[in-house]
Every structure is written in structure tokens, then in C-alpha cells.
Amino acid sequence: MPEVLAEITANVWQVHIEVGQAVAEGDTIAILESMKMEIPVEAPVAGTITAVNVKPEDQVQEGDVIAVIE
């Protein structure tokens, strides 16, 4: 099960997925905000979302698991 990881320390601005949702490789999972820049987080593989570990206004550290795709 591929994990979608935060690439940087940032605030979660938007979450575009929910558990059970099908995603394609490259779909935007969430948008992070750091230093007034928006950083899209994309699905590395196609599949179904089995876990969403963040919500808007959460803070993530580099390497934190944002979501899991099966």
C-alpha cells in the first residue's frame, strides 16, 4: 500500500480526497501551504484511498503520511 508523504514541513490548506475514493496517478490529493506558496500533493499511483491522516489547518512535517492508497 503506497503511502502519500509530505515532502516539506507545511500547513494543510485543502484536502481533496476521502476514504473509499478512487484516484488516478497524478490526481491532487491535498494542497499544502508553506511561506505563502501552495504545494500540490499528487497521488503516486492509481488506486483507492484507504486512509486520510490530515485535515485542513493541520501541520505536517517532512515525511508525515498524508494518505494511504491501496
Image (cartoon, rainbow, N blue to C red):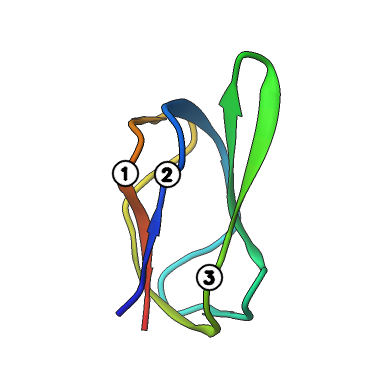
Please report contact status of discs 1 and 2: CB closer than 8 Å, yes or no. yes
**Residue 63 bears which disc, if any?**
1
Instruction: Specify the quadrant that holds the C terminus.
Output: bottom left
Q: Quadrant of residue 42?
A: bottom right
Residue, x 47% and y 26% (percent of image)? 10
Count of labels in the image:
3
Residue 27 lies in what quarter of the image?
Answer: bottom right
Q: Is residue 27 above or below residue 58?
A: below
Question: What's under tag 1, amino acid-wise?
Answer: Gly
The residue that label 2 is drawn on is 6
29 relative to 32, above or below:
below
Residue type for callout 2: Ala
Q: Around disc 3, counting alpha carbons within 10 Å, would you say few (fewer than 14), some (14 to 19), or many (20 or more)?
A: some
Q: Count residues near mark 2 (Cα–Cα under 10 Å), then give few for <14, some for 14-19, many for 20+.
A: many
Which mark sits nearer the N-terminus, 3 or 1?
Answer: 3
Residue at 46% from the left image edge and 42% from the top image edge:
7
Compare marks 1 and 2 and give the one earlier in the sequence: 2
Task: Please state the horizontal and vertical placement of residue 66, each as a whole percent of the image.
Answer: 38, 52
Q: Which label sits on residue 44?
A: 3
Image location (x, y in percent) of residue 61: 33, 31
> Which residue lies at the image location 62% right of the left edge and 77% below the top edge?
25
